[in-house]
Image (cartoon, rainbow, N blue to C red):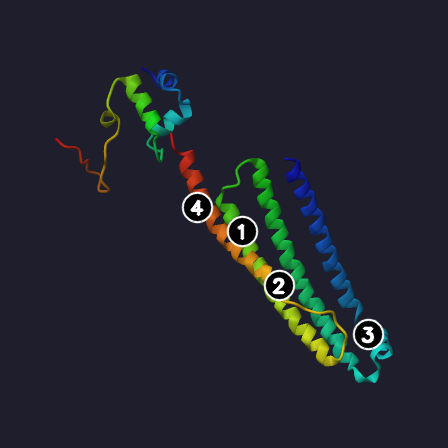
Amino acid sequence: MQLQRVTEVFLRLFALANLAVGVALVVGLVASFPLEGRMLGRLLEKYGAAVDGETVVWVLRLLALVGMVGVLLLHRFVRALGAMLATVRAGDPFVDANADRLVRMGWALLGLQLLQLLSGVFFVWFGRLGVETSTWTPSFGGWLGVLLAFVLARVFRHGAAMRDDLAMTV
Amino acid sequence: MTLTELAGAVDLTLANLSILKTGKARAIRFSTLEAICVALDCQPGDLIRHVADDGETTDAE
């Protein structure tokens, strides 16, 4: 029970942190328009005229949009996981609703994996624009996570059916 | 014997016995079947019968 409580608190904090990142991305995107001149100045200062500052700023805006999609997907994932935990606490986790939640979580994870691939495209793009970036490596574990979610959804679906049968066994 | 008395005799809740009586049960444990047979001094065949999908029983005459 203690572990359950800790997990729930952790999930709530994670959801808040995720939403905070989402808000920061929206603020950053909106602010990038009035502050475009200052951003271009900083780019010029760091890279000189060799870098096309305006394109870099637009790519950053696109990256912020991609980040927002990621925040939304993560939010869906965390909400579904929280709802599943609530059913565990209620003592009846083998229900069809949890199988549906796992399917939703699987799709959210798949979306996040695709965004991770897309972020690789951005790294290449930044590289071609001459902007320094950290290294990017594909996340193989994430793809396993996607598979795991869909497999677990099927397991839960069977579990829910068995649970129903058991409830009606005299 | 009333349903309540039978429930007490076979150690089942009245709710579960009602599920069995109304035909809503999906399955019955051998232990439950045996307990009812002992309480009512009968055979499983006296309690259950097969009904084909078209509604006709397949009991031997």
Name the amino acid, label 1.
Leu
Look at 79% across and 82% down and name the residue there.
Answer: A51
N-term mark: 2 or 1: 1
- The residue furthest left is B61
Q: Are marks 3 and 4 on the same chain?
A: yes
- Residue A148 in view, yes or no: yes
Q: Nearer the viewer, residue B22 or A57?
A: A57
Name the amino acid, label 2.
Ser
Label 4 near label 3: C-beta < 8 Å? Answer: no
Name the amino acid, label 3.
Glu
Q: Which residue is mark 1?
A: A102
N-term mark: 3 or 4: 3
Q: Which residue is mark 4?
A: A158
Label 4 near label 1: C-beta < 8 Å? Answer: no
Q: Which chain is indicated by disc 3? A: A
Q: CA distance from mark 3 to mark 1?
A: 42 Å
N-term mark: 3 or 2: 3
Q: Quadrant of the C terminus of chain B?
A: top left
Look at 38% across and 19% down and name the residue there.
Answer: B7
Q: CA distance from mark 3 to mark 4?
A: 55 Å
- Residue B21 in view, yes or no: no
Q: Nearer the viewer, residue A160 or A126?
A: A126
Q: Would you identify the image quadrant in which residue A29 lies?
A: bottom right
